[in-house]
Image: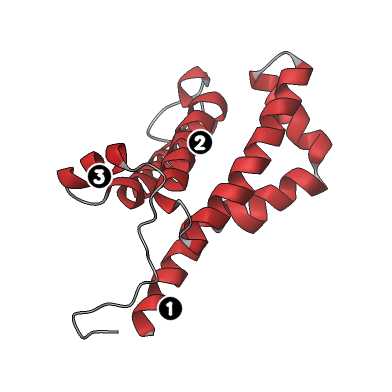
Amino acid sequence: MLTVLIEFAIRCLMVALFLPFSALDKVLNLKVAISQASQAIPNRLFAILLIAGGFFIEVFMSLALVTGVADRLAALILAGYCLLTALLWKQFWTKPDFRLKGASNGRDVFWDFLKNAALAGGFLLLAFGSNGSGVQQFLHHPFASSQPYATVRSGIQ
């Protein structure tokens, strides 16, 4: 029972940024979200579609990851989402004041970029596991669950 609670807590921590916080922020501050998306995507309709797609990913992929239903595919999608949002909205390289020492808005964006990349790495570990055989398993059964809440048969529960 303890291992199930720990696994559940770990998965909740992995998605806490998205569900409920970022998804709720998109609902409560939709105009701001559209405005922010429009900075990277000039076409307003496409920006709205990106916000809607982001909301869908944040809610449903997070739920899949927490429940263990097609959680490996959900983790892969969340990893891609983290990397895409980093590339679209955390463009530290475009900031004219980016420097490693002293006050710098660009450095703050750089840290946000790295946080997104690190979170993507964590999701990739959930998707593929920590060794090469996990990649092969995923490719053969992308919709399979990792069965995170199955009882451990080795005696530790």
Q: Which of marks 2 and 3 is in front?
A: 3
Q: Nearer the N terminus, badge 1 or badge 2?
A: 1
Q: Residues within 10 Å of mark 2 (few under 14, many from 20)?
A: some
Q: Taking 11 as reference, is 32 left or right?
A: right
The front one of 145 and 8 is 145
Residue designated by label 1: 5
Asked whether residue 37 appears in the rendered view, the answer is yes
**Amino acid under disc 2:** Tyr
Residue designated by label 2: 81
**Amino acid under disc 3:** Gln
As measured in the structure, the alpha-carbon distance from the residue carrying label 2 to the one carrying label 3 is: 22 Å
**Amino acid under disc 1:** Leu
Q: In which quarter of the image is the N terminus?
A: bottom left
- Confirm or deny contact between disc 1 and disc 2 (CB under 8 A): no
Q: Please identify the residue farthest to the top as the structure is shown.
A: 42
Asked whether residue 103 appears in the rendered view, the answer is no
| Place of residue 129 in the rendered image (x, y in percent of width and height, measured from the top left) | 26, 51
What residue is shown at x 16% (from left), y 43% (from top)? Answer: 132
Residue designated by label 3: 137
